[in-house]
Image (cartoon, grey):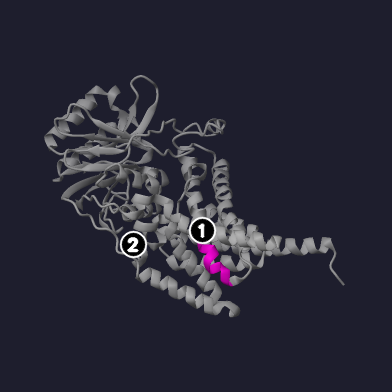
Amino acid sequence: MQPTSAEGRQAGQGARVRMLAPAFVFGACMPFAFSPYEYKWLAIVALAGWLYLLWRGPAWWAGYAFGLGWFGVGAWWLAPTFHTYGPVAWPLAIAAVLLVGAVLALFPALVAWATRGLCRREQELLLVFPCVFVLEEWLRGWLLTGLPWTSPGNLLLDTPAVGWAAYAGVYGMAALPAAMAVSVFLLSRRSARAFGAAGAAVCVAAMFLAPSPFKADGRVAVAALVQANIAQDVKWDASFLLETMRRYQRASAAASADVLVWPEAAVPMFLSMAPDWDRWLISQVRDWKTPLIFGGIQREPDSRAAHNGIFLERPGDSKRQFVAKQHLVPFGEYVPSWLPFIRSLAPGIGDWQPSFDAGILYDGERRYGSLVCYEAIFPEIAAARVRAGAEVLVNVTNDAWYGESPAAWQHLQSARVRAVETGRFILRAANTGITAIIAPDGRITQSAPWFGESAVQGAFTTSSAVTPFVRWGNAILLVFVLPLAMMGIFRWYGGRS
């Protein structure tokens, strides 16, 4: 007796429901593979388990539940941030996190749908899944302004495979953990174990035969990065301003370096509107006899447009250099024009304007490329700074917004990959941490204790090297597009035949 159409629908719905919970759990495991937890193996297990589910059940829903677990659970730290500094009521703050997870979950859902649609046999996953996964990561990096947070390519840090970042970038590197997960999945399938073993062998070879990271080839200098540890609730408080500047002055006067770096918005005022503080800063830099790079804000003289960016003050210079942030944080530094009502719900959202300058500061000896806070998660911005002439990158940030959550560590992890992609040292000054000097191979050579007042002093080397990723950008992703396009054409032609 054949089941009725109603019975068939009920059976399909039952399978969907039974699959949603484990898919969500596998997704919720993903954030723990990244900093500060570093259980990298957990990502391979989670992805392999997800593959098992999407192969057996409705692929779209398996992908969506996985993404909801990954990004909904992984972004939990946004809720206290929205509530404390929005300020947004707890129900709305929690709803905002769920909304972020619900939107970003569409990307894994797309991966699952495309993978299942292109593969007729399990063995084909070995080619299709890594390619689709890479393209999805690239899409997540720019669609709707982009949010490549906890990108799987970051997992190759501190492994022999990290050198691939200088060639394929963080999106291309996602192919390796994806291929490892497919290999694990196929090894569990009796009919495809040979393919799983072959895939595992290729992954091991790709890891241990990876090219070496680029080395800085220029002049050695010493930087002093000041971490003043200013709590977010007093950072913009006028009554705390004197203490803020004293902390920076104290640490800077004690340093012996070729350049001083202060974090994002270290000077919490428009210097053009505070002439006394402006003169004070000029005199301090003259006394230190050291160029100062510091995060600050600037208002356009002929308009109300304001920018968040980085200044460079050189001893004796008549004009202060300034470059502004290019990629602003949506719902944090501005409200998208298509969602104007958000401002009424969260009046604390800023109203900054983006800039389109080259992002290069020159102290007479070295050219610095700017990465202001959030910009450090975007590989394209770092590569553009190097193409514009940056010999070293400077990342100023203020992660005090996120308290003692994993966000600050995940932000640092992204910055470390930018160093490998570009073959540049990164001088990272953070208000509350993590302040660090990052070498071109992604290693942290010097760092400051988290949530402490201190100065990191250490050597760095300039570089003129141009990595393949800097030269070609994401064009390497075409390598992953062509196999999918060919397979899609064959599937379409075979279906018609």
Residue 163 shows which numbered tag?
2
- Magenta segment, prevailing SS (helix, strand or loop): helix
Instruction: For the N terminus, give its image quadrant.
Output: bottom right
Residue at position x 41%, y 43% in the image = 401
Q: What residue type is labelled 2?
A: Gly
Judged left or right of residue 177, residue 15 is right
| Foreground pick, 210 / 472 | 472
Residue at position x 83%, y 61% in the image = 5
- CA separation, marks 1 and 2? 24 Å
| Foreground pick, 428 / 482 | 482
| Foreground pick, 69 / 324 | 324
Whether residue 347 can be seen here = yes
Instruction: For the C terminus, give its image quadrant.
Output: bottom right
Q: Is residue 83 magenta?
A: no
The residue positioned farthest toward the front in the image shown: 497
Residue 213: x, y in percent? 29, 60
Q: Does the magenta stretch include residue 129?
A: yes
Q: What residue type is labelled 1?
A: Leu
Residue 432: x, y in percent? 32, 46
Residue 353: x, y in percent? 41, 31
Residue denoted by label 1:
482
Is residue 481 shown above or below 194?
A: above
The residue positioned farthest toward the right in the image shown: 1
Is residue 273 shown above or below 171?
A: above
Nearer the N terminus, badge 1 or badge 2?
2
Whether residue 395 can be seen here = no
Element under disc 2: helix
Element under disc 1: helix
The magenta span reads 123-132
